Image: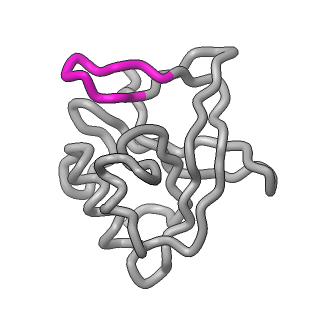
Amino acid sequence: MTQRLPMFVFGTLRLGESNHFLLENKYARRLPAELTDYVRVESELGYPMIDQQTGQKVNGELYFLTEERYDQTMMELDELEMLPPGELIGEWYQRLTVTVTTSEGDFTAWAYVKPQS
């Protein structure tokens, strides 16, 4: 399994959005967060995604997943984003480590981003 980091979300996984049920009751805390040098774009299928772009910012939420549910939750999130089992890169998303800024400081986190060519 990969490194256990918090998860930065920016679209349908956010609180109140359609896929948030995958995170419900599976995190210890949530913080508003900002990701620098990325921009929110739309995929060819109309889904939100983020791509690298210097000088831009994406607002989102940082989830600190509970230890006992971490691996299962990450598998479910990878499945949602159509990553092949055990892989970090799929057709539409890549799970990448990023640095996000919160009111409690900077954190290294996972984020699903547009695959880098």
54 above or below 8?
above
78 above or below 117?
below
Q: What quarter of the picture does the C terminus occupy?
A: top left
Question: At x 63% / y 35%, what residue is drawn?
Answer: 35
Q: Is residue 104 left or right of residue 88?
A: right
Q: Is residue 3 left or right of residue 69?
A: right
Question: At x 24% / y 38%, what residue is drawn?
Answer: 90
What is the quadrant of residue 115 in the picture? top left
Q: Which range is magenta?
A: 40-49
Extreme residue toward the front, this view: 16
Question: At x 51% / y 66%, what residue is drawn?
Answer: 4
- Specify how the rendered protein is coloured: one colour
Q: Is residue 7 left or right of residue 102?
A: left
The tally of labels here is 0
Question: At x 48% / y 46%, what residue is drawn?
Answer: 9
Q: Nearer the viewer, residue 117 or 71?
A: 71
Q: Nearer the viewer, residue 46 or 75?
A: 46
What is the quadrant of residue 37 in the picture? top right
Q: Position of residue 51 (x, y in %)?
A: 47, 22
Q: What quarter of the picture does the N terminus occupy?
A: bottom left
Q: Position of residue 68 (x, y in %)?
A: 42, 84
Q: Position of residue 20 (x, y in %)?
A: 36, 55
Q: Is residue 72 left or right of residue 26?
A: left
Q: Position of residue 102 (x, y in %)?
A: 74, 48
69 above or below 89?
below
Q: Nearer the viewer, residue 90 or 72?
A: 72
Asked if residue 42 lies in the magenta stretch, the reply is yes
Asked if residue 11 lies in the magenta stretch, the reply is no
